[in-house]
């Protein structure tokens, strides 16, 4: 598989599939290896034992030129990758479940290494294809 990617036969994007997107509304508990967060599934689904990416909106200053050739600075908001982690469990109300669908609020227990979760972060669940 890696040899195919190196030779250009298969792109890296094709080796994974996005399963769902989640927005963080609250952080209930967190330490250096675990976090319990609450939020809503924006698209797709969230499922137990899934791999995730954490994104956060960040403001960046971009330098551009106006019509007269003067350099101007513009503030631009864009999503930044913060890190990777794994969903340990999914909770809907008081019940631990295997997965939760789009439009549903739920809690996620996340196993990570030194990530800090904040409200408005976006979590993306993905699976690697073989």
Image: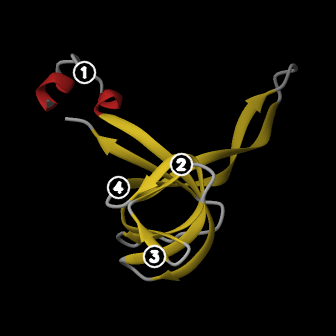
- The residue singled out by tag 4 in the image is 50
**First reached walking from the N terminus: tag 1 or tag 2:** 1
Residue at image coords 54%, 69%: 117
Q: Residues within 10 Å of mark 4 (few under 14, many from 20)?
A: some
Q: With respect to residue 127, does 106 lie above or below?
A: below
Q: CA distance from mark 4 to mark 3?
A: 15 Å
Give residue 32's position: percent from left, percent from top.
39, 79
* Residue furthest out toward the front: 95
Label 3 or label 2, whichever lies nearer to me, is 2
Label 4 or label 3, whichever lies nearer to me, is 4
Q: CA distance from mark 4 to mark 2?
A: 12 Å
Say which quarter of the image contains residue 104: bottom right
Do tag 3 and tag 2 residues touch (Cβ < 8 Å)?
A: no
Q: With respect to residue 17, does 8 lie above or below?
A: above
- The residue singled out by tag 1 in the image is 10
**First reached walking from the N terminus: tag 1 or tag 3:** 1
**First reached walking from the N terminus: tag 4 or tag 2:** 2
Residue at image coords 53%, 48%: 21
Q: Which mark is residue 21?
A: 2
Q: Nearer the viewer, residue 65 or 56?
A: 56
**First reached walking from the N terminus: tag 4 or tag 3:** 3
Q: CA distance from mark 1 to mark 2?
A: 25 Å
- The residue singled out by tag 3 in the image is 35
Q: Is residue 13 left or right of residue 30?
A: left
């Amino acid at each position: 598989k890696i040899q195919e990617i190196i030779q250009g036969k298969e792109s890296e994007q094709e080796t994974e599939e996005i399963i769902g997107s989640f927005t963080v509304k609250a952080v209930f508990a967190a330490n250096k290896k675990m976090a319990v967060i609450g939020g809503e599934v924006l698209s797709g689904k969230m499922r137990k034992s899934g791999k995730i990416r954490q994104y956060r909106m960040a403001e960046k200053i971009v330098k551009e030129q106006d019509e007269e050739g003067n350099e101007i600075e513009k503030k631009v908001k864009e999503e930044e990758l913060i890190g990777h982690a794994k969903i340990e469990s999914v909770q809907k109300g008081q019940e631990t479940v295997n997965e939760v669908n789009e439009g549903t609020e739920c809690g996620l227990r996340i196993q990570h290494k030194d990530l800090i979760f904040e409200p408005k972060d976006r979590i993306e669940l993905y699976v690697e294809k073989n």
